[in-house]
Amino acid sequence: MRGGRPWEGVFVILSIISFLLIAAQAADDDLGWEMDFDDPLHDPFQTFTIPEFGAEMTPPGKILNSSRETNAGAEPAGGQLLVIEDLSYMRPASNSSEKEERYRWANFSIELPEGWDPALEGGRYEGNLTLEGACALVRISWFEDSGIDPESCLRQAVRAYRSEYLRFSVLTVEAGEPVAVGGQWASSLNVYYKYGDQEAQKRLIAWSSPVSGRFFYAFFWSCPEAWEANLEKFELLFESFRDEGFERYVELEPRPNTLDGWGLVLSEILSSYRFAAVPTQPNPEVEVKVVMKSHREGGRVNQLASEEIVSPTRKGAVPLREEALQKLLRDRGYGVAILQRGGAYWVVVQDPLGRWQAISSVARAERGLGTLIGPGEAEWYRGLVVDGPKEATSEDAKGSSDLVVEKNCEPPREVHLKPAAEVNLTWILGLRDLLDRYRYSQEESESGSFLRAQVLWALLEREGYDAWLVTGYQGHPLYQEMWVVLSHPGGGYVAVRLAAAGDGGGLGEIVSDVERFDGIAYDTSLQYSCLHPDRGLSIDPGMVRTPAPG
């Protein structure tokens, strides 16, 4: 059938669906058959074992006419530019001649080879584009990317072809060279098979597009005598592929410093909570189905081709943990969004200057809610913005996200305090006397200022002072140091620099260094210990034993 369409004519179907054989009534002239094999492809985060490509999966045989050589200097095949870009379903009237509008759907474009006719179904989030040329058939399918690895999808197609229900006399399946698809490379698979005295070969490709959050799968079939010419058109077609992306795709500017004052407070908020037991959500699944078709003309089969149908059987959803984290931070006044790419979801937070901080959720066995991702991890700052959570419609719904997180303790806050302009001399002398009256024991001083500061804070609180524990942050002159700040009765604040361990100079010295009035403030030793158990003493001022006078 040279120069004809692949499936013109009448054919009767014999199906194998779900491993049941259903006979069709006989026909004396044209006869066709269709055989289905279903095999679910689970999300890669599930324990689904898929054999790797290798010699054990490629029985003896060969792929005929599989050369990818083309004329590098040739002009692209002439024809129309097929643009699929509208946000809504557009169906012209049956008598409409505006054919181009019929294809403006899904935000990608290709250069259509001359003489190839398109047929489109579905929409921008899920659909199929079928292209029929002279003895050639191409189908491009797309759906929301739930994290399926393209090569895993192709390996699953191998499993379908090797089903005992598809008894090919010859079957060769091997990994092909990467195929250029727009500005990226797609994984490919070459398939050659014989069924009776009919033979066919195909090329399968799969790739994911981060700018639209979609997974693409395509197959190419051609009559053997036109394979080389149609293969060149197929390759030029996919070189012209352009995914226009969705309006929700963003590339954010990351914050240059992760643990500056703003970032350290955010990190401490994440440590102030923990995830409760969250029900496991169903993982997305993708089904791979192989359909065999033949065509008879003049009383004999003259074409044989297979068709792979790749479709999601269970879609993914935003994880409850990320939704709960988004709500928690929004309730605390942060600008928060959820990004998604390849089935992964994560939270990003905007700082006062409009830059962004990405958060990686912790593993289930770890403490806290997440960790901050540095600016060098560019992939964490690009993706599709997930639509915000719907407003709760009942008290039960409003409290559902609160059940996902549990509070460990209050987080600290960043402070910018004013030193006392005028001091109460009696108060200052009493404080100085207290600082000089005692000294740190050797055991308390070995771990540095963080332990000594908690000891001093507990003593001051026991004696009736209003004191805070304060630390520096990334970029602060006193980063990795802790000291104590007290509220002055006449207004303003007083800072105490800790005495060095073992110098016999008391507990500390009253200072007015400006850098000690800016930092991250903790209300109690218990609060700091909750967030930093490695440096915390969990001292209750009421339980402090007064040290011996120095």
Image: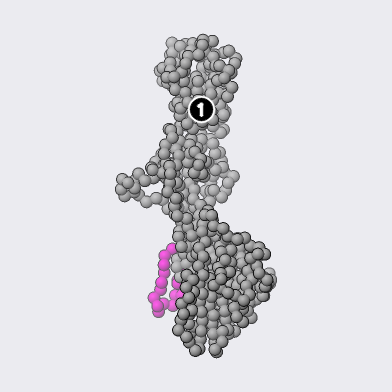
**Residue 315 seen in render:** yes
| Magenta stretch, main secondary structure class | loop
Asked if the magenta segment contains residue 93, the reply would be: yes
Q: Is residue 325 above or below residue 147?
A: above
Which residue occupies the foreground of this view, 44 or 23? 23
Q: Residue 241 placed where, x, y %?
A: 56, 66
Q: Name which residue lies at 54% across and 89% down.
A: 299
Amino acid marked by disc 1: Gly
* Quarter of the image that includes the C terminus: top right
Q: Residue at x 38, y 43 (%)?
A: 403
Is residue 131 at all visible to an observer of this figure? no
Relative to 350, does residue 52 appear above or below in the rendering? below
Residue carrying label 1: 536
Q: Position of residue 163 (x, y in %)?
A: 56, 69
Q: Residue 216 at x, y = what percent?
A: 53, 64
**Residue 356: x and y, percent?**
51, 44
Q: Which residues are magenta?
A: 87-106
Please tell me whether residue 99 belongs to the stretch shown in magenta. yes
Mark 1 is surrounded, within 10 Å at the Cα level, by few (under 14), some (14 to 19) or many (20 or more) other residues, namely: some
Instruction: Write down the quadrant of residue 407 in the picture.
Output: top left
Question: Does residue 326 sit above or below 438 in this rendering?
Answer: below
Q: Quadrant of residue 255?
A: top right
Q: Nearer the viewer, residue 299 or 501?
A: 299
| Residue at 63% across, 62% down | 53
Question: Is residue 31 placed above or below 545 in the rendered structure?
Answer: below
* Quadrant the N terminus occupies: bottom right
Number of on-image labels: 1
Q: Quadrant of residue 479?
A: top right
Residue furthest toward the left? 394
Q: Could you tell me which secondary element the residue under label 1 belongs to?
A: loop
